[in-house]
Amino acid sequence: MAELTARLRRLHVLGSVSGLLGWDEQVNLPSAAAEARGAQMALLAELAHAESVAPRLGELLVLAESCLARGELDAEAAVVVRAARRDYDRAVKLPAELVAEKARLSSEAYHAWASARAARDFATFAPYLEKHLEIARREAELLGYGGRPYDLAIDRHDPGLDTARVDALFARLRAGLVPLVRRIDAKGEAARAGGGHAAELKGFDVEAQRRVVREVTAALGFDFSRGRLDVSLHPFCEGSGDDVRLTTRFDSDEPLDALYSSIHEAGHGLYEQGLPRERAGTALGTAAGMAVHESQSRLWENQVARSRAFWRWLEPRFRAAFPRALEGVSGDQLHAAANAVRPGGMIRVDADEVHYNLHILLRFELEKRLFDGSLAVAELPAAWDALAEELLGRRPEHAAEGVLQDVHWSGGAFGYFPSYTLGNMIAAQLWATAKARLPGLEEDFARGDFGRLLGWLRAEVHAHGRREDAFALTRRVTGAELGPEALLAYLDERYG
Ligand code: ZN
């Protein structure tokens, strides 16, 4: 186990070096250095691949498994061995040529996607999507998911989950969500017709925004001695343990975008900072999966930071930072802007909490059909538009507003979208449980004290690493099965 753990840790260190180079690429890279960075990343990927398929690693796994079978290892070691076996088998069973082919295709497809989106022309991107689907099917065949390749796509992001379980959950979500959204939208329309109007938020000094988002994320518990906050085109969180990098973006007319992007990424960062450091590199020190990861970012971003209580604490700080920009804007208007519901939006990343999950239901349905062969790539735009009308109430005006809006498919990242909505479900369940277990939680927020919530998440979620899948984790922490009911109740309470 000591030798196995040491090898897993080396792999983790190599991964963290490429993660750091990837962060640097998006935050600092001089434009002429792209090629050199490409070479650095490629060499690291080669080294990591060689380590991950090392025959000695395979031998150690066989030894550890025989110890397990004889009952000589404890439950913690069992978690480490099983996860390492899964990763090892994937690395060994996928030929290096296929991995390289996918990397090459992703890089070409990314550029093809970007120009197709600019030209609003799906046909030029379609051949790349076809190739990605073909690779995904070959991978599934090689890894033993031949019967249902989409299961592999989901399992990659959320170990333990599969199409049937997600499908059943999403069907229940859809049945409750569609009528709820219609009701909320109708109320919004009536309010606007009755003369309610939103505040205009313009002219927010970027330096002051930078100070505010740092103060807020630090107050939530993000440890800046073990992390940083920088700027990139698309916000993200990279790294783990003692070196967690968050990014955000600033626009003087979009102060809430910087604020909520920063809080969202800080939620991911708090999880990474809360994983057991001494277990780094093993499943015990690794996040449970993308759905649980997303539950952490969404919980802080939505349930906590869009609440009245949070704004009671933030409002005076906001006013002190932006005295001119907030002249004539009331506290109610500020809180309303943070909870604005915008019906008819076609773009997932701009969607509010109420409409967001409809965008995911749409993508899940289409990915499922693409993988089971009932939908051809050529028919995808028409299928997208029809489903958009059914779920979101209107058709996109062009492909950039529809089928070409997301970057995921250009990288062959199928099965990723469901994690966002599963994360929203888990966040709502965790939130309901936290409020019941920790009375007076929202009064804490109004005082700028987020320590009790963070401490609870640390103990109940972060400390457990990848011991359980999303279903088992939710069951243990909340006492209920993972389901859409808490999310529906939360949305109804806040927006209904
Ligand atoms: Zn996220």
Image (cartoon, helix red, strand yellow):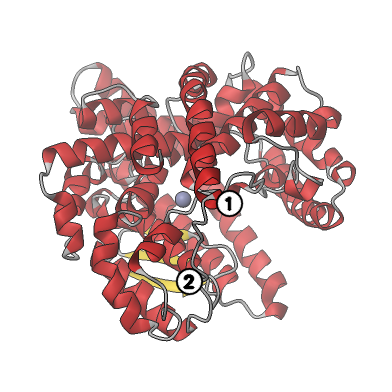
Q: Nearer the viewer, residue 380 or 286?
A: 380
The reply, left or right, for residue 319 in relation to residue 452 is right
Quadrant in the picture for the N terminus? top left
Q: Amino acid at mark 2?
A: Pro
Disc 1 crowd rating (10 Å Cα; few below 14, some 14-19, many 20+) is few
Q: Residue at x 35, y 43 (%)?
A: 494
Where in the figure is residue 232, as x and y percent of width and height? 55, 70
Q: Residue at x 40, y 65 (%)?
A: 334
Q: CA distance from mark 2 to mark 1?
A: 16 Å
Measured along the vertical axis of the image, is residue 69 above or below residue 356?
above
Q: Residue at x 21, y 53 (%)?
A: 454
Q: Nearer the viewer, residue 364 or 29?
A: 364
Where in the figure is residue 320, as x and y percent of width and height? 31, 83
Quadrant in the picture for the C terminus? top left
Q: Nearer the viewer, residue 2 or 305?
A: 305
SS class, disc 1: helix
Q: Residue at x 43, y 86 (%)?
A: 324
Q: Note whether residue 402 is visible.
A: yes
Where in the figure is residue 72, as x and y percent of width and height? 18, 24
Residue 373, disc = none
The reply, left or right, for residue 122 in relation to residue 200 is right
Rendering quarter of residue 238? bottom left
The reply, left or right, for residue 8 in relation to residue 55 is left
Where in the figure is residue 89, as x and y percent of width and height? 51, 30
Residue 349, disc = 1
SS class, disc 2: helix
Rendering quarter of residue 125? top right
Q: Amino acid at mark 1?
A: Val
Residue pointed to by mark 2: 255
